[in-house]
Amino acid sequence: AQSVTQLGSHVSVSEGALVLLRCNYSSSVPPYLFWYVQYPNQGLQLLLKYTSAATLVKGINGFEAEFKKSETSFHLTKPSAHMSDAAEYFCAVKLNNAGNMLTFGGGTRLMVKP
Amino acid sequence: GAGVSQSPSNKVTEKGKDVELRCDPISGHTALYWYRQRLGQGLEFLIYFQGNSAPDKSGLPSDRFSAERTGESVSTLTIQRTQQEDSAVYLCASSLESFTGELFFGEGSRLTVL
């Protein structure tokens, strides 16, 4: 069963435009949710995480994500894209009964046009 | 180095051969994970080590796959009798505790099976 789904394997925005990367999870119990980013030729790094505290989570580089239980979503946003934001973004979930395993979505490659 | 180190970075092998992939985690990290990323797909959990506990092998796709870890240091992922479908990037990650949500990833080992 798919636990986390990222809509759109590729997203292209213009520099300065809003970035919206979608993530939906399937769980009856709110899980822990994460966004990781992979810049070209680098390993994945944690961007931000939701662990049942505030529903709006702020991360590095101006990104933030909002946990919406009613929509089972954890979309990633940034008000104004920068060329350096071009990367692959992965949503991940730790289900409460999944031990220590993170389940990752398929990834979304963000392209930023000048 | 300060990060997770993986070797080799690239490996090309012939179908039927065995391969070994190595991961050197961050010093002091008790947890170590292996993931696989096939082209255009998300990260697939393979195996998890935590200290001296029995590893969680629930993600290993077949008995051709095995992994070892010596104490809280280096881990080796072994794939026997490689098949073309084993072609992927194999990612290693480590973390400080059994679960914080923040995994520190290496740059991966790209395996190509001809």
Image (cartoon, coloured by chain):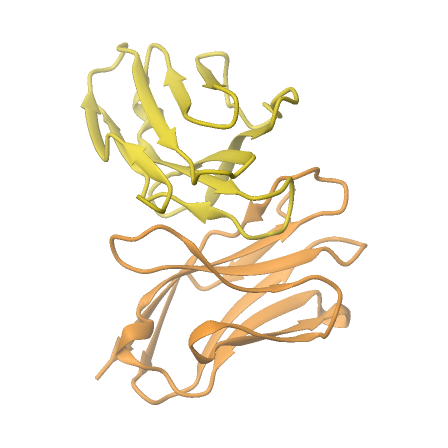
Chain colours: A orange, B yellow
Query: Would you say A111 lies left or right of A63 here?
Result: left
Q: Residue at x 56, y 44 (%)?
A: B96
Q: Quadrant of residue A69?
A: bottom right
Rendering coords of residue B85 (x, y %): 35, 26
Asked if B26 appears above or below A50 in the picture, the reply is: above
Instruction: In this rendered view, identify the residue nearer to me: B97 or A77.
Output: B97
Q: Is residue B114 visible?
A: no
Rendering coords of residue B78 (x, y %): 38, 17
Q: Residue at x 63, y 50 (%)?
A: B100
Instruction: In this rendered view, identify the residue nearer to me: A95 or A105.
Output: A95
Q: Is residue A60 visible?
A: yes
Q: Residue at x 37, y 88 (%)?
A: A17
Query: Where the N terminus of chain B falls, by quadrant?
Result: top left
Q: Residue at x 34, y 26 (%)?
A: B22
Query: Would you say A94 lies left or right of B79 here?
Result: right
Asked if A83 appears above or below A46 in the picture, the reply is: below
Q: Quadrant of residue A38?
A: bottom left
Instruction: In this rendered view, identify the residue nearer to me: B80 or B114.
Output: B80
Asked if A17 appears above or below A3 in the picture, the reply is: below
Q: Quadrant of residue A65?
A: bottom right
Rendering coords of residue A9 (x, y %): 41, 60
Asked if B100 appears above or below B9 in the picture, the reply is: below
Query: Where the C terminus of chain B falls, by quadrant?
Result: top left
Rendering coords of residue A113 (x, y %): 24, 80
Query: Would you say A106 lies left or right of A70 here?
Result: left
Numbered disc total: 0
